[in-house]
Amino acid sequence: MTTSYRLTQYASGGGCACKIPPGTLEEVVKGLTGHVSPDLLVGLDDGDDAAVVRVDDRTAVVATADFFTPVVDDAYDWGRIAAANALSDVYAMGGRPVVGVNLVGWPMDTLPTELLAEVLRGGNDVAREAACFVAGGHSIDDPEPKYGMAVTGLVDPDRLLRNDSAVAGLPITLTKPLGVGVLNNRHKSTGEVFAHAVAQMAALNRDASVAAVAAGARAATDVTGFGLLGHLFKMMRASGVTAVVDAAAVPYLDGARDALAAGYVSGGTRRNLDWVRPHLSSTVDEDELLLLADAQTSGGLLVVGEVPGHPVVGEVVVRRDAVVEVR
């Protein structure tokens, strides 16, 4: 039964490509304010990956939620990917996930609940790998299937990674190759399965996070629905500096360029590029920019500083006319 349904055909979008466009989202939340306190270490201001609240001098709580429509047809793999993606927000802050609760929307009249059990099994297996408890959750009857988690973690306030702390003179490291967006779009359109893309999306960012913190990094974000260019732009804008990206140094998954050439570019990717373009200076062609703006699902960390074992894809410089430069 679990192999007779193509889950991606039951939703208009897929994965992090179904996010509300970044420019629209910023307009929606503009002016929203919460409690002002020195203990609210990370709030709404710069659109960081999670909220962080100080408990005491050595402990802060990291809180986040992430869910999306099916990015792959296999229910178990979708659960794994969605859980890894939700946990990634905690890792992007330099934290350790402690407990997650499931968030589910399920079309009860359309898809069997046996498939939902497979989705939850996949999420639970990845959370177990992360040593993160899964304790209940919330579900609704929904015309489109959706799954993710609300995750709570812990972090040392003095070792917090955040998106407004990039400083000039440091390299930029990317911890996973790009390209899952165009491959997922090809999968949704054709049914072709890209096992290497699934494996990457289901892989935790735990080790990269630990290595970044150990290397003394202070600024990071994860690369998800807004693409590398979108998330890098947000980080540089918040930090008041400029990023210079070496396009030739950016790694891509096998098949990503072929998928791009075949036209499997999501609307979310195009919206990402349109949003960043006014703040972008580039000497590369449009196809390269589309790959750099490719809407990723459960992508890697973008770290200001060197992370052993991962490629340096650019550097941070003092603020120039453009917030992001691509060469």
Image: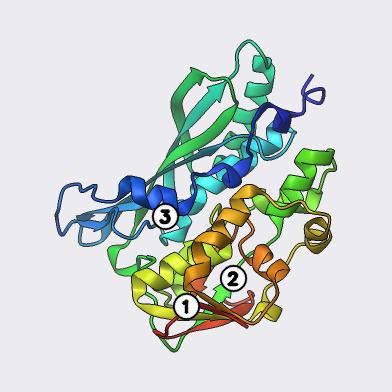
Residue 197 position in % (x across, y down): 74, 52
Q: Quadrant of the N terminus?
A: top right
Q: Mark 3: few, some, or many residues within 10 Å (few <14, many ≥20)?
A: many
Relative side of 197 to 298, left or right: right
Q: Secondary structure at mark 2?
A: strand
| In front of the other: 326 or 277 | 277
Image point 67% across, 40% down: which residue?
71
In front of the other: 1 or 121: 1
Q: Residue at x 49, y 49 (%)?
A: 21
Q: Nearer the viewer, mark 2 or mark 1?
A: 2
Tell me the amino acid under the disc marked 1: Ala
Residue 234 in the image: state x and y as whole percent: 43, 65
Q: Is residue 311 left or right of residue 231?
A: right
On the image, the x and y values in percent for residue 165 come to: 35, 73
Note whether 90 is above or below 169 in the view shown.
above
Q: Three-letter amino acid code at disc 2?
A: Leu
Label ID, residue 215: 1
What is the CA distance from the residue labelled 2 to the residue labelled 3?
16 Å
> Which quarter of the figure has residue 48?
bottom left
For marks 2 and 1, the one nearer the N-term is 2
Callout 2: 10 Å neighbours few (<14), some, many (20+)? many
Mark 1 to mark 3: distance in Å?
20 Å
The residue that mark 3 highlights is: 49
Alpha carbon distance from label 2 to label 1: 14 Å
Q: Amino acid at mark 3?
A: Asp
At a point 23% along the width and 50% down the height, the residue shown is 31
Q: Pointer 2: what residue?
A: 174
In what element is the residue under mark 1?
Answer: loop
Disc 1 crowd, CA 10 A, few/some/many (<14, 14-19, 20+) = few
Q: Earlier in the sequence, mark 1 or mark 3?
A: 3
Judge by depth and name the residue closer to the eye, 285 or 61: 285
